Image (cartoon, rainbow, N blue to C red):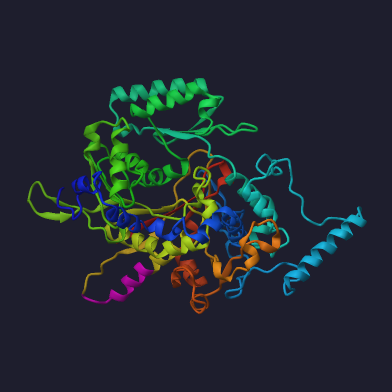
Amino acid sequence: PTSTPHHFSMMVDANDTETTKGQKKRKRKSNPLSQARGKQNKHENVWFRRSNAGYSLFVQYYMNQPIGTISSAEGIKTGDEKGTKQEGSKMGPKPSGGGIMQQKSGGGNSRAARRRHKKKKGKIQKTNPEAVDETPLVPTTDSLTTEFSSPPSLLESAYSKFEMLDDGPCHRNNVEFQSFLKAFSQPLPLSFRMRQCESVSERRQADIEVAEEVLKEFSDLVEAVPFGNTTLYRSKSRPGDVLCKENLNRVSPDLKEFLIDNSQNGVLARQEIGSMLPVIALHDVGAIRVGGKVLDVCASPGSKTLQALEIVGQKGRVVANDVSENRLLTLRQALGRSGVSSNLLKRIHFTCQDGSRLAPPVTKSKTSGEKSKLQFNAVLCDVPCSGDGTCRKDKHILPMWKPNCGNDLHDLQLRILIRALQVVEVGGVVCYSTCTLNPIEDEAVVAAALSKIQTSKDSKEGSKKKRSSPIVELIDWPSMPGDLVRRQGISSWKVAEFRADDQDDSSQGDIDDTEDIPKITWHDSYASATSQQPTCTMSPTMWPPSDESSNDLHLDKCVRMFPHDRDTGGFFLGPDKEEP
């Protein structure tokens, strides 16, 4: 179809080499993620990055989130295991309105008094070498919870500065919290997958089988994770080293050559495991199928678009949308280099629209000639996010990390999800996903969308007007590939912001002392946050729903993927189904 409001052909002029500086400037302003992160060359951001303040804020933020956010809770599900209800998601006291995190001992004392207390404590330990240290020791038997290697990473160093501070629920389980930080301090292991069977010819299927045989020669480096009709591969755990993109050429030049050759001829796809899960899950529940219609709302960089295309095949259709013309052009070029046949790539329709106001393409019936808007069996809703789950492969995330970024993106994420729920067909499934573990961008968005759709339905009940949105509910997650672990969603979380103007002057230097670390401001309600003139976007939907509403929403059906469970990135998914 060519009647879409913003067709791909419009991008030829927009990406011309003669584009003016003014045009480029407007494009940068239209990027919601860039707006949320702020200008990197601002004076305060330059100090922020150089002082490693982002690492301290990241540790401080997740250390005080409830159990289940990034650490153990009841209800872990592996494979087809059902698990039990997550009782730990409600644990932990709520912070006082707008209060800055206090030190555990002498919280009301002045800075100088706390420093004297620390100095005195050090002298006592020196004069009494037999004094017992009550700090819990970290076990060294498990490879995932061993003591931090030397020298420690910036995340681990930041954690050590918070040991004397008010510990949140996650901090009390410090073994797993340290495992979480340790995993995020390591490079992301190598992962890739074989192309789906539905999209390939008999000849190409033979090539895949040959490639799988060749991979057995690298069995000491990579292992297969069979799942359905495809096979995922990931690097094996290696003591003292992680096989990743950065060291692949040093560890095994032959494996690197194999991956490059078979990526270019369409046999395999280099893709992170977390990024594979939305399409795998939608396929498992029957939403993405041969001949189906799929919408990828925020398609760039295109790995999920191509993964869905491989399943729907030449009888199906995939609409790839992105708000950025440049990213959409890059996506199309990447698909052209994927090795997938041109006939199959023709089944992709590209649109350049704001995902929160997306207008579906218009199709024309071959029999009656009538025009109608295309409805989708499945919608991939992988929204722009703060991206802290990708910090293992993106070194720029943590140095500039602030809770403000996720807060600023929350409203946009909510609007995109609501729009996705409006364009999916009745009985279809929307998979909302992010590459962050921040509940403000995860469960808070899903809860708000479900509540708004239900409110829309209730307000029109009894009216002669046809309601615009069917009822939506979270569905049970299908089985996970191999031994991957799924953690349940949470129903309670905390809202915070970083207020640079509230920091002491002494905190504007190197963060070498626990007195000088930047502090997060916590808000227990929307009213509390707005009364203090917040420095970022605040919305009532950021706060957890009431206990009664939470029980109706079944947020525990959402999926959290922790990096320290199976050495992956951090990922979140929420499968929503339209009911008639």
Q: Is residue 461 magenta?
A: yes
Q: Is residue 456 left or right of residue 363?
A: right
Q: Is residue 367 left or right of residue 319?
A: left
The percent position of residue 409, horizontal first and vertical second, equals: 42, 61
For the C terminus, the quadrant is bottom left
In this orientation, which residue lies closer to the viewer: 311 or 82? 311
User: In the rendered view, would you say 548 is above or below 11?
Assistant: below
Which residue is at the front of the view, 32 or 342? 32
Residue 546 visible in the shown view: yes
At 43% from the left and 60% from the top, the residue drawn is 36
Say whether residue 368 is magenta.
no
- Residue 382's spot in the image, x, y percent? 38, 52
Residues rendered magenta in the picture: 452-464
Occupied quadrant, residue 197? top left
Residue 63 drawn at (x, y percent): 62, 59
The answer to whether 563 appears left or right of 175 in the picture is: left
Left or right, 245 with respect to 363, comes to right
State the residue in front, 512 or 105: 512
Q: Residue at x 51, y 26 (%)?
A: 249
Q: Residue 60, how many percent across, how many down? A: 61, 60
